[in-house]
Amino acid sequence: MNLYKYRNVPPRASALLESLRGMGYSIETAIADVIDNSISAQAENISITFHWAYSQSYIAILDDGIGMNEVNLEKAMKLGEISATCKRKEDDLGRFGLGLKTASFSQCRSLTVSSITEESGFQCLRWDLDLLASQTDGSWLLIEGYVEQEKFKQLPLLEQNRGTLVLWDRLDRSFPSNITERDFLDVIDSVQKHLSMIFHRFIEDGDITISINNRKVFSWDPFAKGHLAKTWATSSTKLVNGNGARIECHVLPKLEMLTNKEAEDLEGVNGWKEHQGFYVYRNKRLLVPGSWLRLGGIQKWKQDDIYSLVRIQLDIGNSCDEEWKVDIIKSKVTPPHSIRESLVRYASEARKRAQQTNKKNINRNHIISEQTPSSIWNCTSDNHYIIDRQHDAVVALSEQLSNIEPLSLLLSLIEKQRPIQRMWASEPDEELKEDPISPPSPEMYELLKVMYKNMISRKGMTHSEAIRKLNETSPFQQYTELISKLEEI
């Protein structure tokens, strides 16, 4: 006998939907979520239309998939119809049963979905957030049919007589009232780049064609597959205890081995630094376009220029969503503990290879360029580093010697014998750090005095000019206390 009493407390429609609008979608991720449904519906062609008309602007996403009958369309429009724990088809890109609605409501206040199948013909349902907000009883009123005076928006679907059309009207989140046409065009460009990245494997394999305002979206290859200058890559390998997960490591070619066009393409939407690390795919759909997934031990690996050539393809199936903690927007994952050690092992080898290949050629010049103009090291056109013979310290010491030939020989020896390979490769996973500052010493003070006297007596500088110059000269700018002790001659 049940001793409990129950109450039915359904959520207020308008309040819940307004809350769901803040789930964190961008317009790029929202459109990608809708396209997931098109791919699951076996669409081959997906056409996105951005129509600019100020407050009457709208976005239409049309596919030529199998479409939905009346029953299935109502299920698709219902929030949470399919549980996240339900077993799905292998090619299904959905998970929570919320994507179409939450992605759409994150951008617009009116969502219309129309669909055509050969058996049931044309069907259309519509959510209107303003209508729901006006219902004092909190009811869920799903409107049948489209807005009659906007039938022209349905024509592309009616003409192809198959598939599904998703319409976003009243784009209060995507395009607020102060947006300009230029802003509108910038959004289109951003969406195009995002889709070319997220669905690049579908596009490459010829599974789908995506177009935006009748312009074809081309795929973005993050791994430079087939490039002859790639220094290292592995074949796809099944991970032990990975529940079918597979890994494939790539170290991209150095920048000097790429054409300007190749370098620009590989840089991607977010830049070299942000696109390093793991690329996590679920059924070929890209979830994470570069991340170290909080791996690397106590000090988690961070995005670092030295590893910008590392890109690791990691494939998981849609039965692993709970195991990998895939979020509702499908942009974040957390690797299960059972394979974290394997991932670290593969990634560590890739990072080591990249470091040996890169030798900091991406950020080494950047660091040198950020030093003061008086840095003691000069970079030649062929990327070698030599001691600047005109550096104030070198000049000051030279002028104290009657024969500078031994000094020149010593400097040349230092240039040739620097342990560069050992410095770059001995600690492959250690982040790039500045050299530690040596403590002030009598020898350093004596050298400063020699330089100071040379500036005053030979270069005709005033005391203040010489002090300022020393404070701007590497590495002496680190010893401001010693410089301040120099007495005016």
Image (cartoon, rainbow, N blue to C red):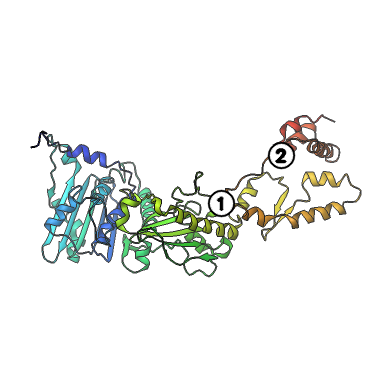
Q: Which mark is residue 438?
A: 2
Q: Residue 192, percent across and down?
A: 37, 57
- The image quadrant that residue 442 belongs to is top right
Q: Secondary structure under badge 1? A: loop
Would residue 123 be visible to someone looking at this image? Answer: yes
Mark 2 is on which residue type? Ser
Is residue 288 shown left or right of residue 474? Answer: left
Mark 1–mark 2 distance (CA, rounded to whole Å): 24 Å
Q: Residue furthest front?
A: 1
Instruction: Between residue 246 and residue 22, name the one nearer to us.
Output: 246
Foreground pick, 277 / 320: 320
State the residue at coordinates (62%, 55%). Answer: 425
The N terminus: image quadrant: top left
Q: In which quarter of the image is the C terminus?
A: top right
Which residue is the extreme one toward the left? 1
Eyeballing the image, is 283 above or below 12?
A: below
Q: Residues within 10 Å of mark 2 (few under 14, many from 20)?
A: few
Residue 469 image position (x, y, % from top left) = 74, 38
Q: Quadrant of residue 39?
A: bottom left
| Vertical order, 434 against 198 (above or below) | above
Query: Quick check: 136 left or right of 272?
Result: left
Q: Is mark 2 on a helix, strand or loop?
A: loop
Query: In the drawing, does residue 439 fall left or right of residue 395?
Result: left
Q: How many residues crowd around disc 1 within 10 Å: few (fewer than 14), some, or many (20 or more)?
A: some
Q: Mark 1 points at which residue?
A: 429
Instruction: Confirm whether residue 56 shows in the render.
Output: no
